[in-house]
Structure formats: C-alpha cells, structure tokens
Image (tube, helix red, strand yellow):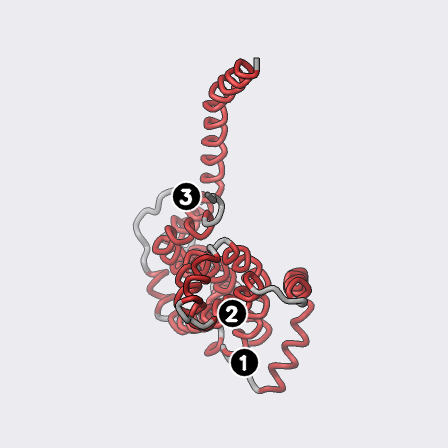
Amino acid sequence: MVKNDNTEQEYKLKKSRPAVWVFMWIMAIIWLIIAIVPFFFMVLNSFKGQFEMLMNGIFSMPEQLYLDNYAEILSGGFFRYLLNSVIVLVVSLVILLFISAMAAYPLSRFKFKLNQPIYALIIACMSIPMHITLIPIFKMMNKIGLYDSIWALIGPYVAFAIPISVFILTAFMKGIPVEIEESAAIDGCSKYKIFFSMILPLSTPGLSTLAIYNGVTMWNEFSFSYTLTQSASARTLPLAVWDFQGQYSMNTPMIMAVLTLTVLPMIILYVIMQDKLIKGMTAGTVKG
C-alpha cells in the first residue's frame, strides 16, 4: 500500500513538472523584458540627436549613429569622475572584505561568551538608516579635514557594508569543513596561518559575491557623495550624472549617453565575474 502511494506521488510530481517549468520560463522572460527594456531605451536614445527622440519617438531607431554625445561627454571631465569612482570603489572593497573576513572567521569558528552578543550587535546595525548619519558624518569629516575629498567616502561606505558582509561571510565560513583546520593545526599551523593560507582561499566565492554586491551599491551611491564632496575634482560618477543632467537639462540623449557610460563598467565587471557570483550564491546550499 505504501509502495503504491509513493508511486502515485512520483507520477503526480512528474506530471506537474512540465507545468512548473513553463511557468518558470514565462516568469523569467517577463523579468528579462522588465530588466532589458530600460537599458535598451537608454542605449538606443544615447545615439540620437537632441530633438530626434521627440520627433521620431523614443523607441525609433536612430537616423544615424550620433557619436557627438559621447565625444562631448568624454572631453568634458568624465574621466576625472570615473577615476574617482574607481579609486573609492577599489580601496573601499579591499578594506571591507579584509575587515569582514577577519570578523567572520572567529564568529564562525571560535566559541566564547560574547560570540552571539557581538554577532547580534553586528546584525542589528543593518537596521540603521543611512540618511540619519549624514549630518554627524559631515561634521566629523569637517573636523578631521577630509571633507571635499574622495577619502571622505571610504569610511561611510565600508561602515555601512560591514554588517551584511559579516552576516554573509559568517554563514559561508560555517560551511567550510572543520576537519581542514584540525589537520592544519596538527601539522603546527597557527590560527593566523590557517586563516590566510586556507580559510581566505576557500572563501573566494563568498568574497567575490560580496565584492560584486557591495561594489554595485558603492558605485551608484549618491547621498554621501553629494554631502561629503563639493568640488568637481572630488566627485564620483553618480554626481557626474547629476551635473550633466543640470548642464544638459534639455538634451535627453546626452543624459542617456552619460548613464550608458556610467553603468558600462559594472556590466563589464559582472560579465567577467558572473561565474564567481553564481558559485558564491550557491555555495553551501548542497551538503553531503
């Protein structure tokens, strides 16, 4: 009787699989359309003249590839904004990943009385709204002399990304077999050597996922960049979009060109690191 029930359940499961896959494909296609239409609109209109979009329609093909939009932007200080964003992103990610890994390792491995309270405190920091810290951070940067420089952005970027990064890395490191560390300890390796030569290399998928996740957030961050910088020499790409929007308020294709150049580095980064991102997201989901 039990065998017949199991056979019937397996038959129903196999029968329902095609319908489930069809539904999943339909939802995936709908989501793809939602995601790609704005990008297609942005790139398409960036190659149009100032009034061509209004005369021919927003989804009409360009009469010709109007490259003057890109030429004017690239000659107007765009590379300065790009360099500032790259410096802030790289320095912030290096500091963030190092601190997060150093914090996640003892929280995932060592047993001590303050383990759970410290972990809970770090997780609680995820609920702090970013905008309520703008004025205190602004005053602090003024006092220490970092206001209106790209270095003023690194501290807030790292601080607000640490809680989620520690949370993810702690869960990731718990999935690394303890036997590896025990074998290394028997061979005489110290905790520091185990961490740098074994735990960090094994955590590469998780670190790569965090690098992409936090990198996109830092690349597009506007509030701190607008509050802590004033001169054009210290501003990042989101403020370049803001400045160009004010400068070319009546030239929508020019603004579309700025947006295209702004998102292009993140798209290239994702294409290069997409395999590591997928590995980091799926690592630890299957055990045994």
Q: Which mark is residue 185?
A: none
Q: Residue at x 67, y 67 (%)?
A: 114
Q: Which mark is residue 56?
A: 3
- Residue, disc 1: 148
Q: Is residue 147 left or right of residue 63?
A: right
Residue 198 spot, x, y in % from top left = 41, 64
Residue 160 spot, x, y in % from top left = 59, 66
Q: Say what amino acid the circle numbered 1 marks.
A: Asp
- Residue, disc 2: 102
Q: Relative to 95, is 22 above or below?
A: above
How many discs appear?
Answer: 3
Q: Relative to 283, is 187 above or below?
A: below
Q: Which callout, 2 or 3, points to the residue nearer the camera?
A: 2
Q: Residue at x 47, y 30 (%)?
A: 26
Q: Which callout, 2 or 1, points to the residue nearer the camera?
A: 2
* Residue 209: quarter of image: bottom left
Instruction: Pick whichever of labels 2 and 1 is earlier in the sequence.
Output: 2
Find numbered disc 2 in the image and state the secondary structure of the residue it sits on.
helix
Q: Residue at x 33, y 64 (%)?
A: 71
The 10 Å Cα crowd at callout 1, few under 14, some 14 to 19, many 20 or more, is: many
Q: Say what amino acid the circle numbered 3 marks.
A: Asn
The alpha-carbon separation of the residues under discs 2 and 1 comes to 30 Å
Q: Is residue 195 left or right of residue 162?
A: left
Find numbered disc 3 in the image and state the secondary structure of the residue it sits on.
helix
The alpha-carbon separation of the residues under discs 2 and 3 comes to 56 Å
Instruction: Pick whichever of labels 2 and 3 is earlier in the sequence.
Output: 3
Q: Relative to 9, is 45 above or below?
A: below
